[in-house]
Image (cartoon, rainbow, N blue to C red):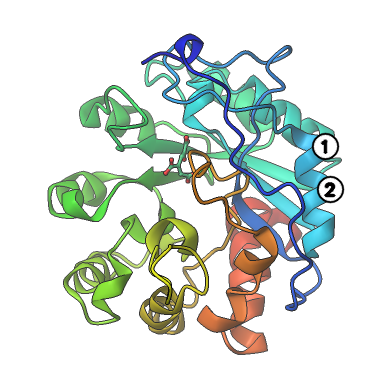
Amino acid sequence: MTADTQNRIISWHSAPSKPSYTPPPGAIDAHCHVFGPMADFPFSPKAKYLPEDAGPDKLFALRDHLGFARNVIVQASCHGTNNAATLNGIAKSGGKARGVAVVDPAISEAELAALHDGGMRGIRFNFLKRLVDDAPKDKFLEVAGRLPAGWHVVIYFEADILDEMRPFIDAIPVPVVIDHMGRPDVTQGPDGTDMRAFRSLLQSRDDIWFKPTCPDRLDMARPDGTGGDPWNAFAEAVAPLVADYQDRVIWGTDWPHPNMDKAIPDDGHIVDMIPRIAPTAALQQKLLVTNPMRLYWPEEL
Ligand code: 0GY
């Protein structure tokens, strides 16, 4: 299905609650997106979903409402390899946002340098078949080998392909960040098959980072069986991972929650998960400030 045959969808909460948890000064929402606005930044003809506009003004209002200081805007699949909407968000942030791009692997060095000047600090490889048509590993490795200095690669995949991803991840010549921990089944618990496989990946290199994010995507269980909060299985499975790999974790809201239009999460509740996966002030400082600063604003450290 192409974007122009779909209705535009809203996937974000219209009035997110104020979280009980207050992030530390300088906290970074290191996984969020912007959609459009479509009139200025049309969606890709290959987009698998067509969202309503969720531009930088909305994102920055949410940032302030939730108590964050900065954003890392990850190029969403609906914008394909045209990074103009994400670059616009970064430009409008007044230095409070940086980004992760999605590129055509044939991109030139000059174009990569321009993305760097626009605030990008990494590229994302998306392996979810429901979001992208193809993910050519050989071409991805080629471009990963000629990124600007200090950049990293962000990878999005699901747990069922982790094994087949291992040789590819091994070959990436820069630091790697895994979105949403590679989407483990958190209901298996902290020692379940998926978490053990993910831990094995983390053991294989000391420069693989991850985002302990998206309780709303990974934990649909709820006492009344309807899905959504309170995300107990997520907290139980993820807290030990954060404690064990505390220098390699970064966190984000995932706003505007692409494709979550059926069970839209309250961003205040998402933020209130932070002390449940990172219970001490020291862990929270690493997760929300020190670690993302190392990846996205290292010159300020
Ligand atoms: C996420 C997750 C999703 C979508 C995208 O680029 C995207 O469209 O990342 C998803 O649908 O699981 O991280 O935002």
Q: Is residue 203 above or below residue 99?
A: below
Q: Residue 22 location in percent, x, y?
A: 77, 76
In the rendered structure, the answer to whether residue 184 lies left or right of residue 229 reads left
The residue singled out by tag 1 in the image is: 57
The reply to whether callout 2 and callout 1 are in contact (CB within 8 Å) is yes
Q: Is residue 91 above or below residue 274?
A: above
Q: Is mark 2 within 8 Å of ligand 1?
A: no
Kind of residue at disc 1: Asp
Q: Nearest the camera: 132 or 224? A: 224
In the image, 104 versus 89, the foreground residue is: 89
Q: How many residues crowd around disc 1 within 10 Å: few (fewer than 14), some, or many (20 or more)?
A: few
Label number found at residue 70: none
Residue 68 visible in the shown view: no
User: Three-letter amino acid code at disc 2?
Assistant: Ala
Q: Residue furthest front?
A: 224
Which residue carries the number 2 mark? Answer: 61
Q: State yes or no: Cβ of the residue under disc 1 lies below 8 Å from any atom of ligand 1.
A: no
Image quadrant where residue 59 sits: top right
Q: Is 99 drawn above or below residue 69 in the view shown? A: above
Please report the residue visible at 41 percent of the width from the left and 24 percent of the height from the top: 48
Residue drawn at x 46%, y 24% as measured from the top left: 103
Q: Quadrant of the N terminus?
A: top left
Q: Residue 83: tell me if it is visible.
A: yes
Label 2 sits on a secondary structure element that is helix
Task: Tell which of 196 and 299 is nearer to you.
Answer: 196
Q: Position of residue 255 (x, y in %)?
A: 62, 47
